[in-house]
Each structure stands twice: as structure tokens, then as C-alpha cells.
Image (tube, rainbow, N blue to C red):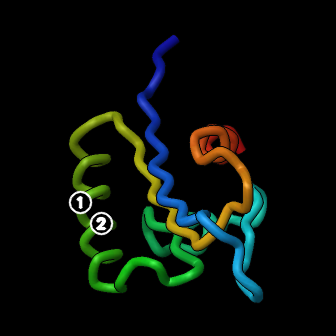
Amino acid sequence: MFYRMFWVVLIAFSATTLWGQNVYEVETIPNPKDIGVGYVSDPDDVIAASDESQLNNIIRSLEDSTTAQVAVVAVNSIGEKNPKDFATELFRY
């Protein structure tokens, strides 16, 4: 059985949960491939649109030329969760 290399890159700004700020669970992170926007899930607009576009182009090129799979997730808060554990759970979801 052949295995592909999967990468999940999680950028989580979770220092403090502020009033009115979304705290994300794995199940509430939008899947960018499901909504046809590429590889970057940025529901809080943490990343500039032009940078998202550039990331999507770079990741598309990487996936086309290798067996790597990449996703970038940028949210303001994952609450008190451990970022590595959250990323692992998100990868497996």
C-alpha cells in the first residue's frame, strides 16, 4: 500500500479569547476545497486576499509536482487547545 505525504499547516492566533471572537472547533473550520476556493481556510480574514491567492498558487504548484498535500488554516482563536493537537485532529477529520 502506498502512502502519500500529508501536511497540515495551522496558523492559530489563540493567545486570548476576546469578546465576540469566534473560537473554532475542528468541525467548524471551513474546508476550502469543499467551497472551491483552493487550499487556504481563513474565515477570520487573518491573511490578506492577495497573500491567500499567492499561497493557493504555490500550493497548487506543489501538489501538481509532488505527492504532498497542503492546507493552510488561519483563525483568530482555537481557545485553550494545543495547536499541534488541534492540527492533528483537523488533519484526521
Q: Nearer the viewer, residue 10 or 59?
A: 10
Q: Nearer the viewer, residue 89 or 1?
A: 89
Q: Residue at x 24, y 72 (%)?
A: 54
Query: Is 26 on the left-hand or right-hand side of 56?
Result: right
Q: Please provide percent x and percent y for residue 72.
A: 45, 58
The image quadrant that residue 56 belongs to is bottom left
Query: Is 93 on the left-hand or right-hand side of 6?
Result: right
Give the distance between the C-alpha atoms of the residues marked 2 and 1, in whole angstroms.
5 Å
Q: Which residue is mark 2?
A: 55
Instruction: Looking at this view, name the residue that lies furthest to the top.
Output: 1
Check contact, mark 2 vs mark 1: CB within 8 A: yes
Q: Amino acid under label 2?
A: Leu
Q: Residue at x 28, y 84 (%)?
A: 50
Q: Nearer the viewer, residue 39 or 47?
A: 47
**Count the marks: how many?**
2
Q: Amino acid under label 1?
A: Ile
Instruction: Looking at this view, name the residue that lies furthest to the front.
Output: 16
Residue 10 tag number: none
Q: Residue at x 26, y 37 (%)?
A: 66
Q: Please provide percent x and percent y for residue 77.
A: 64, 68
Quarter of the image with the C terminus is top right
Above or below, comparing residue 78 to residue 35 in the picture: above
Q: Which residue is mark 1?
A: 58
